[in-house]
Amino acid sequence: MREMMKCASVALLLLGYAGAYTGSTAPVFGGSSGNGRRQILQRGLAVSSSVLAPWWTALVAPPPAAAAAGSENLRTLQQTSAALQQCTAQTDLFLRGLVSVDPLPDAPRLPPQISLRVFQGLAPRAKNVPARNFEADDFLGTAAEYAEHAGSARDYAKLAQLGRIGENGSEEVAVFYAKKAAEELVETEKTLQILVLAVQ
């Protein structure tokens, strides 16, 4: 706000002394004809715009650090969304990887859950996504839904991996929790996809 007031003050000064900058001898405030005043104001505005342009650009443009952080946060969403799509595209292999006694190297794995801080950083740039019936004001609310589904998917995945352990453990228990993890995975991927569309 202080910088904006400074810019406005400079603009007024430049307009007031436009005659000095443009070589005009007609006074700006009072005593000149309508056409003369208009010409002087036009010259003053031309001068002031070239002087004020760097200030306005600095005020409107985001700080470099903030812009870099925003780009990094967007990449996090895009990369996580791509990893989730790999899981949903290979559901059978994902399930086998969860219930298998021995690790399956080719089975897709759940990506790390995105923190709330990342979504908070991207919220100001969110836009409506009419095709998904999504409004920008719902960005953080939808991010909370993503966190709920992502957390549930991870919990069920852990239970599936532990489903064979203990006297109550069995392959049936492991498969049950693996399927629950897959269901939550689908909802996680769908929700995150909307959030990506809202900010990219």
Image (cartoon, rainbow, N blue to C red):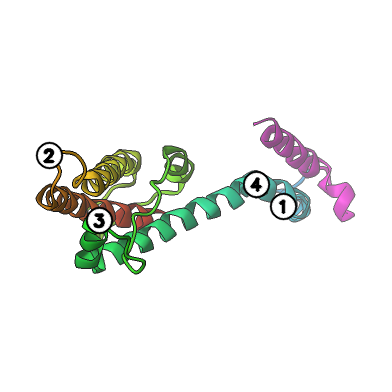
12 relative to 75, above or below: above
Quadrant in which the N terminus is drawn: top right
Q: Position of residue 73 (x, y in %)?
A: 50, 50
Q: What residue sits right under mark 4 in the picture? A: 65
Q: Is 148 one of the magenta-colored residues? A: no
Q: CA distance from mark 1 to mark 4?
A: 22 Å
Badge 1 amino acid: Ala
Of the two numbered discs 1 and 4 on the same chain, state the one appearing first in sequence.
1
Q: CA distance from mark 4 to mark 3?
A: 40 Å
Q: Residue at x 32, y 53 (%)?
A: 192
Q: CA distance from mark 2 to mark 1?
A: 72 Å
Query: Which label is found at residue 53?
Result: 1
The answer to whether the residue labelled 4 contacts the one labelled 3, judged by CB atoms less than 8 Å apart, is no
Of the two numbered discs 3 and 1 on the same chain, state the one appearing first in sequence.
1
Q: Nearer the viewer, mark 3 or mark 1?
A: 3
Badge 4 amino acid: Ala
Q: What residue sits right under mark 2 in the picture? A: 168
Badge 3 amino acid: Leu
Q: What residue sits right under mark 3 in the picture? A: 98
The quarter of the picture where residue 13 lies is: top right
